[in-house]
Amino acid sequence: MYRQTDIIEDNRDTAQGNFVINVGPQHPATHGVLHLVITLNGETIQKIEPHLGYIHRSIEKMCESLSYRQFIYVTSRMDYLSAHINNHACSLCVEKGLQVEIPPRAQVIRVLMDELTRIASHELWWGAMAMDLGAFTPFFHAFRERETINDIMEETCGARLTMNYMVPGGVMHDIHPNFQKRVKDFMQLYKKKINEYDELVTGNVIFQNRMKGVGVISAEDAVSYGCTGPVARGSGVSSDIRKIYPYEIYDKLEFDEVLETGGDSFARYMVRIREMQQSIRIVEQLIDNIPEGDFMTKTKAVLKLPKGEFYSRVETARGELGVYIVSEGATTPYRIKFRSPGFSNLSILDKMVRGGKIGDLIAAMGTLDLVIPDIDR
Amino acid sequence: MWSLSHITNEIHEWLSSTFNPTWTLIFEMVLAGVAVIGLFAVLGLVLVIMERKVSAWMQIRLGPNRVGPKGILQSTADTIKLMVKEGMTPSGADKFLFNLAPFIAMIVAMLLMAPLAFAKDFQLWDLNIGVLFVSAISSLSVISILMAGWASNNKYSLLGAMRSGAQIVSYELSAGLSVLSIVVLAGSLSVSDIINSQADGWWIFKGHIPAIIAFITFIIAVTAETNRAPFDLAEAESELTAGFHTEYSGMKFALFFLAEYVNVFIVCAIGATLFLGGWMPLHIGSWDGFNHAMDYIPSSIWFFGKTFFLIFLIMWFRWTFPRLRIDQLLNLEWKYLLPISMINLLLITAMAILKWHF
Amino acid sequence: MTNEELKSLISGVLPSATYEEGTEWLTLNMEPTEWPEVAKKLRSDEQLFFDYLFCLTCVDWKTHLTMVYHLSSTKHRQTIVVKSKLDRNKPEIETVSNIWRTAEFHEREVYEMFGVSFLNHPDLRLLILPDGWEGKNPLRKDFEDPVNMIKL
């Protein structure tokens, strides 16, 4: 994967006393096969150039030969930490094309699953983030809670990571009888644990010094670079699709869009921590109010979307996921484009850490919450 | 009463009665060398398993629990595995320096054991400048790290070694100054004199608040000097993969690893000696009954108990705190710790002259 | 803002624009040569202020390629789609990475997947594909890879 152009650049950079190191594709802090070519002067970062594609599976091309029911399963493998939400986005897009309304029970279940996924994803991020900064213990504390969510998911969906639970027309099957009780138990426990996180990590002086003023993104840059999700909201850009373009029942729910104005790593960190609390609010509103009724609208066995273009936007744990389907009226999509949040968020990495130290790169990259299969697709 | 010094005296008497004085000296030196190597290996194994158990306890895990009862033989098994592994040398490396570096790390760690008093009258070499010897020798360990980082021909290693160089050289100052404050109080550089001066109470209690400040400075500085988290910038797993020992494998890696743990033991032993009285039992002023009861606990248990308490403290730091950034690390030393320990040294000197301490 | 209102607003700024019917969002068609001007106006006009390019992609229609830009405004919360037909044999269009920085990465992706060359792009190189894939354009419909592709 070493490209000719880099070798020329290397020579140019080393002539100025700089040197080039490869962070990744195998590196503990990239959490996947991300390859960053970094030009350093001493410890100071001069330039970062991401090289992608180590886990590119060409999902967009693959989807062109899969039917509208099949392609949703592939998308679980994009952003595997918010698999439910990916499936949700695809189902929404197909439903938009088919013009089917899904029953209220399915809507509530979908939103519940989305929010649990969001909590689980932010959990993992929190642990991994602290581990990047050299504190190992939070990782295990985060996993303790995440495992509980995975167990709840496993009971209902039959899988722990790539759930494939949401299908066009609703959800695949009804929730498990234990679901409500277990989620309520978990919420009781979790509200205590989230304060423990603050004590362990957020209040730590070293942690705050590492995070504050690092990787600052201005609001204009965040919009221009297409940053979404907590990355944009850390800079004060209102970008929560759940609020701006509500889907399912989000417009009827009470929750706040979390905004921080700092724009630095600490602001993004706080956005995610507070977002977990908002997700708890949503889950608590819904868990006792799951309406009775069908969990799926009857759809035809073979789905055919009418000729046209359909676009759906949802808020994953990482930001805005867009699914763009171009249909020619056949049983398979003519072209699918996934607008993944990580891909756009990654593009600002060079801008935000240029001039910082290697430690800043790790702290800033951690708060971008990159999932590499989501970037490569 | 059974004690370590009793055993050494027995051996000495037997050797003296069997051989002439020259041979006695030679045999005793060999025995001491074997003992140090043995202690080096045992300490490494014990501390590795201790660290893994402590971290497991803090992280709600079980830790190693398969090899031997409660997994206590796990580190032995790991060491055997590392011994039979191939020790690779990267093709672009400076082979001589690359292979020399781990041995220097180990030799430095072993030399530091010489002036330690493990129990009452149980000391390899009671030289009159013991504390100075420790300060001098421990600064050599940076050479092995720089050597390893440079010879590896790896940019990560080089960055790690350079960080480590800056770090150890800076933190040596405040570690030295806080050691000096106890030397001022005790009025001697010899380890046995410092311990004897604490017969009526440990310096951390006798020296009022300045001694506590010196103790805290010392613990921070030696944590940095031994490259332990939160100051593990030389290794910085998530930044530099493994820093200066990225390219090492097999036993050469194990030597670095063991040397790190033995260094932790040594700095904690020195901390225990200077501030917590070494092998001296807990004595409080003129409470003769209490002091007498404390004397029944063997001195070696006092020494190892205190040392392992400090080691536990340093492990606790490691598994709780995030890592500092390199500029924050140097700021902490040059802007905060060094001025504080300098003023503290002045206070302690004034205290020692005016006899304000107990 | 409804599509009709937006349409009248855009017609004021861009009198020559043509629209597609029956779409969810207002869809503009324009020639690739007009694009840099149109983009600047869409971005800078106070009433429109499309500052957020949330999707940039390309569709291969076998006879031609179509560039699709999804634009949205964080101030007025309105969304439009801009499309531009490109010649399939020599697809060229001006870059918009100087207007929306996110386009830099998205354009590199379209360049390697569809072979569209973006004029004046600061760094038009392969982003995802490895060396030796220049000009192969895997997302085009006529792309064949007998080794790695399994036809269903």
Image (spheres, rainbow, N blue to C red):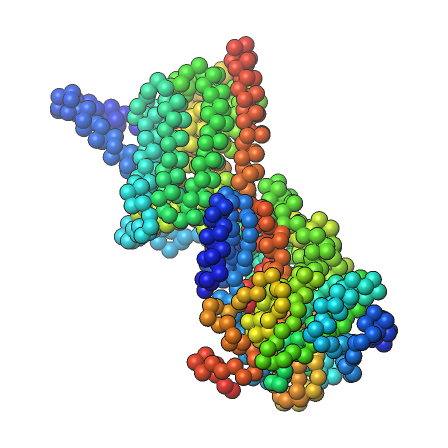
Residue C95 in the image: state x and y as whole percent: 65, 67
Instruction: Pick the residue in front: B357 or A244.
Output: A244
Q: How many marks?
A: 0
B358 to the left or right of A175? left
Q: Is residue B278 above or below residue A29?
A: above
Residue at 47% of width from left, 48% of height from top?
A14
**As displayed, is residue C4 above or below residue A250?**
below
Residue B199 showing in the rendered view: no
Depth check: give the residue in front, A189 or B80. B80
Horizontally, residue A249 falls left or right of residue C138, namely: right
The front one of B212 and B201 is B212
Based on the displayed image, in which of its 4 quarters is residue A63 positioned?
bottom right
Q: Residue A342: where, in percent of width, then height?
A: 61, 63
Question: In which quadrant of the rendered image does the N terminus of chain B lie?
Answer: top left
Report which quarter residue B227 is drawn in: top left
Q: Horizontal placement of B15 versus B93: left or right?
A: left
The correct choice, above or below, for B96 with respect to A156 in the image is above
Residue C52 visible in the picture: yes
Q: Position of residue A173 (x, y in %)?
A: 63, 79
**Residue name at image x 49 percent, y 66 percent:** A54
Residue drawn at (24%, 35%), measured in percent from left and top? Answer: B34
User: From the viewer's perspective, is residue A69 above or below residue C129?
Assistant: below
> Could you tell me residue A145's position as x and y percent?
59, 58
Residue drawn 60% across the image and 61% down it: C122
